[in-house]
Image (tube, helix red, strand yellow):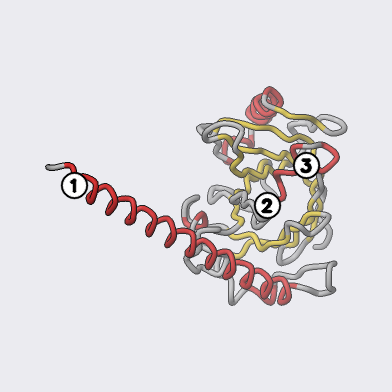
Amino acid sequence: MNRGRFINLLMALVVLWLLYQGASWLKLQRDHQRSREIYRELQVEASLQPGAERSILPLQGEVGDLVAWMASDSRRIDHPLVRGSDNETYLHRGANGEQNSLGAIFVDYRNGSLLDPAVFIYGHMMKDDAMFGPLKDFKEPEQAENFTFWTEEQSFHATTKMVSIIPGETTVDPRDYGSLEKKQELYQFLRDHALYELGEAPGPEEPWIILITCTYEWENARLAVLTVREEPEGP
């Protein structure tokens, strides 16, 4: 291949790469816009009082895998919770089932309910604060918030106790943590990787809800926010 052909081929490859990057950026922007629209509509439908209570009852026909609604104190996180048949589906689908690169906030498929001894909830960390984006601010203890959850029959609060950065290769199975010994091992692991702890250390007998999202301190790192669930209000 002569020098002229090589340069032409190289330029063609660069153009194709730029076109691909441009198309990917446009798709991401469309997904962001559509995601905002979807969750804004769902927030309106789930509202009993603006900025206050949520009810998932109006959403049950629209969100097929609906489990609950969750919101942080500031409402920067204010989303329906879904649970699929695996932990992959809702990485790439919105809560309404539409294909979307922002995904949804979802409960580990192996959790039977939010009343399990240890519940794991996943979501993408987006730079514009979409989905679990606000959790990046939890790296500073003064920015940490607590959460409220609404199910079909009950509501309850969860208090943030620890924030950790853990390897993405860490494997967890909620079904293991019916054992107090296993929960203690998990607590020690999170503590070994903790950025900080808040208040009294949670006991293994207390019910935990752990929020997990991506973070970028190193390749394939994960941010884990350990919260303790309070007793539900309602029937």
Q: Which residue is mark 2?
A: 114
Mark closest to the chain's N terminus, 3 or 2: 2
Indicate the secondary structure of the residue bearing disc 1: helix
The residue type indicated by label 2 comes to Leu
The residue type indicated by label 3 comes to Val
Residue 62 percent across, percent down from the top left: 58, 75
Residue 2 percent across, percent down from the top left: 13, 42
**Mark 2, other Cα within 10 Å: few <14 / some 14–19 / many ≥20:** many
Q: Which residue is mark 3?
A: 228
The residue type indicated by label 1 comes to Gly
As drawn, 29 above or below 21? below
Indicate the secondary structure of the residue bearing disc 3: strand
Q: Quadrant of the C terminus?
A: bottom right
Cα–Cα span, label 3 and label 2: 12 Å
Residue beneath the point at 22% across and 50% down? 9
Residue 134, which numbered label?
A: none
**Mark 1, other Cα within 10 Å: few <14 / some 14–19 / many ≥20:** few
Residue 4, which numbered label?
A: 1
Cα–Cα span, label 3 and label 1: 66 Å
Cα–Cα span, label 2 and label 1: 64 Å
Q: Is residue 13 left or right of residue 167?
A: left
Q: Is residue 175 left or right of residue 199?
A: left
Indicate the secondary structure of the residue bearing disc 2: loop
As drawn, 215 above or below 154? above
**Mark 3, other Cα within 10 Å: few <14 / some 14–19 / many ≥20:** many
Residue 48 percent across, percent down from the top left: 81, 74
Q: Is residue 208 left or right of residue 198?
A: left
